[in-house]
Image: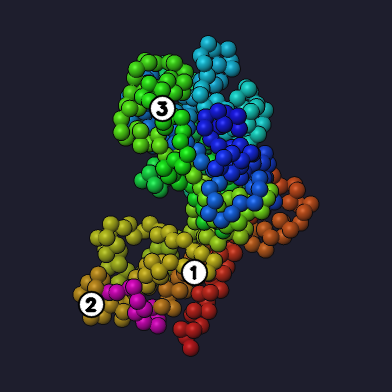
Amino acid sequence: MEWLSENEVYVSDKATWGRAAHPLVVAEETLIEDEPAGRGLLARRDIQAGEALFQVPYHLCFTKDVAVRRFAALGVPAIANEEEYMALAALLLYEKGLVESRRAGSANLGSFWEPYLDMLPSSPRESEPTNEFRKQSSETLNALWLWDEDDLEWLLGSPTRTAARTLRAKVEKEYHEACDRLYRHFPHVFDREGAFSLKNFLWAFGVLFSRAVSLPAEDGLLALVPYADLVNHSPFCTSFIDSRPAEFPYSFRAASSPKREEWWQRVLGRRGGTRSAADGTGSSLYRDAAQREVVAYADRFYDKFEQVYVTYGQKSNAELLLLYGFVSDRNPYNSVEVCVSLNSSGLANDSIAERKRMYLRACGREPDNPECFPLYADRYPLELMQFLRFAALTEEDVAGYSDLDQVDVTRPLSRTNEVAARDALIGACKSALEAYPTSADEDDAALKDKSMAKLLTRNQRLSVRLRRSEKRILERTIAGVQREIQSLKL
């Protein structure tokens, strides 16, 4: 908090002339539905709906612009060609490396962002800290895609397990490509045996996936925002993090070009060329950015000491666990993927099966590959039913059509086709349920048995909660579609 205050983040617990006391206080440990959720933000006092929760000056954020300036001063202008996640990961790893090397006895001045870096969660399985950097953080990254294989086995049958493996493989591929494309050309900056190891690269992306925000007012610009990233998610909250013109003047904003250059030198620790470090800070574009701040507004009234939330978006439990490491049993946006194909429809060998296959190929689809759709507790997408209507087409349905493209599957074609499409959906749901080694009732019993639940690790409990929620959606879908079939047969 001291670092924030020193760098113009208003966190004072005392009111000043024309400005109320800051409404929030940091809680070292919070809960999300009885599971530890790390740090969070609580209401220091009653907070009114529409009140600003925090204001963080834009120039304190990790953005690609900062990364470009940082590495340009180090003789690596190629960072400007990297996409946002790669640029921010490089900046995060380089600054983290400076902190660790300074604490290991190096003569460098460390990182301007050191207090913020100290607050970031550590890598998974680092229960025994190996250096001072990791001792500073009481949290651990727990995103599903970073779990080991033993924990992933608890999600056997869930499509989320495949998603986790796919995401991890993609990030590892990005690392090896970055090594070939960039890191190996500048070994004095990108130490692949130290700060830029694969393990640290995974940590950086874990931090970005779980803490970086996309700012709508900045055309979706990606940013790591100190302090703002402590606020936790609620699926029932509508408040979100964005930027706006600064309400109160910042010294950095009002400063002359030499003063802004001095600030950049402080950020860069006076390494690299003195002039190139602040290159462009006098431009109108940069002055505009320097006059902005990151903010979130309360979407409702908060009582004193109540935890304050924002929304991370309308995400399913699978997405929340995959990227953030938690689930919500009351999540109204929860869903589970179900996959269907011509083969799974049960009608793959009908008399027009080959025509269907040729049509899908002409549309750029591989007929043997499954098409996946989200199922929700109370609905399924229209696109799913349209695909199943197509898969269930018979010669009678297409009589009089010279091409399947003329058949309108956006509306019911016949009672027989509607029943067949729904039968195929029920079959897909039952197949999905059979892939799990346990039933939803068994999962429910395991969680309700307090003595049994205590024997499970946090990751195992989260896995049971996720797979139970997925099975409940599949079961509700089956029951709902069966009622639809009964209505069609009346």
**Is residue 269 found left or right of 81 in the rendered image?**
right
Residue 46 falls inside the magenta stretch? no
**Is residue 194 found left or right of 467 in the rendered image?**
left
Q: Residue at left 38%, top 66%?
A: 383
Q: Which residue is mark 3?
A: 255
Q: Amino acid at mark 2?
A: Tyr
Q: Is residue 19 above or below residue 192?
A: below
The x and y percentages for residue 325 are 58, 45
Q: Which residues are magenta?
A: 407-417
The x and y percentages for residue 152 are 58, 45
Task: Please identify the quadrant where the N terminus is shown.
Answer: top right
Tell how many labels.
3
Q: Amino acid at mark 3?
A: Ala
Q: CA distance from mark 1 to mark 2?
A: 31 Å
Q: Which one is nearer the viewer's eye here, 371 or 278?
A: 278
Residue 411 falls inside the magenta stretch? yes
Secondary structure character of the magenta stretch overall: loop
Kindly report which numbered mark, 1 or 3, lies closer to the viewer in this rendering: 3
Q: Which residue is mark 2?
A: 401
Q: Which residue is mark 1?
A: 379
Q: CA distance from mark 2 to mark 3?
A: 72 Å
Which label's residue is closer to the chain start, 1 or 3?
3
Q: Residue at left 34%, top 79%?
A: 413
Q: Residue furthest right?
A: 451
Q: Which one is nearer the viewer's eye here, 257 or 314?
A: 257
Which label's residue is closer to the chain start, 2 or 3?
3
Q: Amino acid at mark 1?
A: Arg
Q: Which colour style is shown?
A: rainbow
